[in-house]
């Protein structure tokens, strides 16, 4: 969970203990001890507020919930000393109010060592109390924005990301044109973008998730800044993406083919006139002239 986020320690404690249950929280340079009353339905709940977690260092923390059991007395408990509220942990062995270990101040056990010493004390045969234990991590709050690809004016899409903030935490999402800035009264101050709040939802891979819908119908082509901020937790992340004009659709057309006209040239054979057998030389001349005429006609035809 993120520092600055509240969380709850919840459970059931049978037998309606009059003192309730004791809740120990231990970490590096950190310890708290509280008793929490048990409801008529045997449930109990302890809230760890935003103000508390914001002051907790990043790291691992251990929780021990102690039930007084049959004697209805919390046999192991902290005792103040030397200005420390939880200086020593005391118990009924070897004699009543014996110091079992130091929990706060010089020489104190911390984190896992303190938790292990506590459960060892509770496991002692002279202690009838029972307990349950768990652990959690405190991390610096973080928000991640998944990359946003280039969009065209009019597109609808979702900006998504992950976070270690708690489920149901609210995030403020702002999508603003990079060109948006303070203007003079005589200048156009038209806003291009979107803004709104979304809730963190439980994720499936160790991180919680969030989603913000965007409709770019009213957007101008420009570079846009995405800014995501925690509403109750001090954390912010930004990203950039571009919105461009709608790209024209190119339609490829094929011009109709032009029919090819074909000219057929027909040559009509010419029959040479009959020649006189008595004048062979002249006849040959006429035949040549006839052939020349045919050749001439063929050239003219072409």
Image (cartoon, helix red, strand yellow):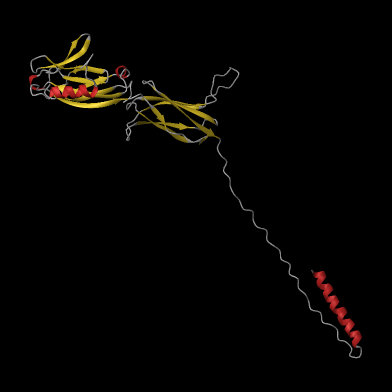
Visible in this render: residue 295? yes
> Is residue 282 shown left or right of residue 241?
right
Residue at the front extreme, as displayed:
107
Q: Quadrant of the C terminus?
A: bottom right
Q: Position of residue 118 (x, y in %)?
A: 17, 22
Q: Position of residue 84 (x, y in %)?
A: 22, 11
Residue at the location (89% across, 82% down)? 285
Number of callouts: 0
Residue at the location (16% across, 22% down)? 66
**Picture quadrant where residue 16 is located:** top left
Q: Quadrant of the N terminus?
A: top left
Residue at the location (22% across, 8% down)? 83
Residue at the location (18% across, 14% down)? 88
Visible in this render: residue 42? no
Residue at the top extreme, as displayed:
83
Q: Position of residue 148 (x, y in %)?
A: 46, 34
Q: Is residue 240 above or below residue 40?
A: below
**Picture quadrant where residue 167 is located:** top left
> Is residue 231 shown left or right of residue 246?
left
> Is residue 276 shown left or right of residue 52?
right
> Is residue 281 shown left or right of residue 266?
right
Nearest the eye: 242 or 131: 131
Q: Is residue 134 above or below residue 76?
A: below
**Picture quadrant where residue 205 is located:** top left
């Amino acid at each position: 969970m993120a520092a600055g986020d509240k969380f709850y320690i919840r459970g059931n404690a049978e037998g309606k203990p009059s003192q309730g249950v004791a809740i120990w929280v231990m970490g590096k340079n950190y310890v708290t001890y509280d008793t929490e009353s048990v409801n008529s339905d045997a449930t109990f709940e302890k809230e760890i507020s935003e103000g508390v977690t914001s002051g907790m260092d990043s790291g691992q923390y251990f929780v021990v919930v102690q039930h007084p059991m049959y004697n209805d007395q919390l046999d192991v408990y902290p005792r103040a000393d030397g200005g420390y509220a939880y200086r020593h942990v005391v118990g009924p062995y070897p004699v009543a109010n014996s110091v079992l270990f130091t929990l706060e101040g010089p020489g104190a056990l911390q984190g896992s060592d303190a938790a292990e010493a506590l459960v060892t004390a509770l496991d002692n045969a002279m202690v009838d109390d029972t307990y349950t234990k768990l652990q959690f991590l405190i991390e610096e709050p973080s928000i991640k924005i998944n990359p946003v690809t280039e969009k065209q004016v009019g597109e609808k899409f979702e900006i998504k990301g992950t976070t270690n903030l708690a489920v149901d935490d609210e995030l403020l999402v702002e999508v603003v044109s990079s060109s948006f800035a303070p203007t003079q009264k005589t200048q156009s101050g038209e806003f291009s973008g979107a803004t709104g709040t979304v809730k963190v939802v439980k994720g499936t891979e160790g991180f919680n998730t969030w989603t913000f819908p965007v409709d770019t119908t009213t957007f101008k082509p420009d570079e846009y800044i995405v800014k995501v901020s925690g509403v109750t937790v001090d954390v912010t992340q930004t990203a950039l993406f571009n919105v461009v004009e709608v790209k024209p659709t190119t339609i490829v057309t094929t011009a109709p083919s032009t029919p090819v006209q074909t000219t057929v040239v027909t040559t009509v054979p010419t029959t040479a006139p009959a020649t006189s057998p008595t004048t062979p030389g002249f006849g040959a001349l006429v035949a040549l002239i006839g052939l020349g005429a045919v050749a001439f006609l063929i050239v003219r035809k072409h």
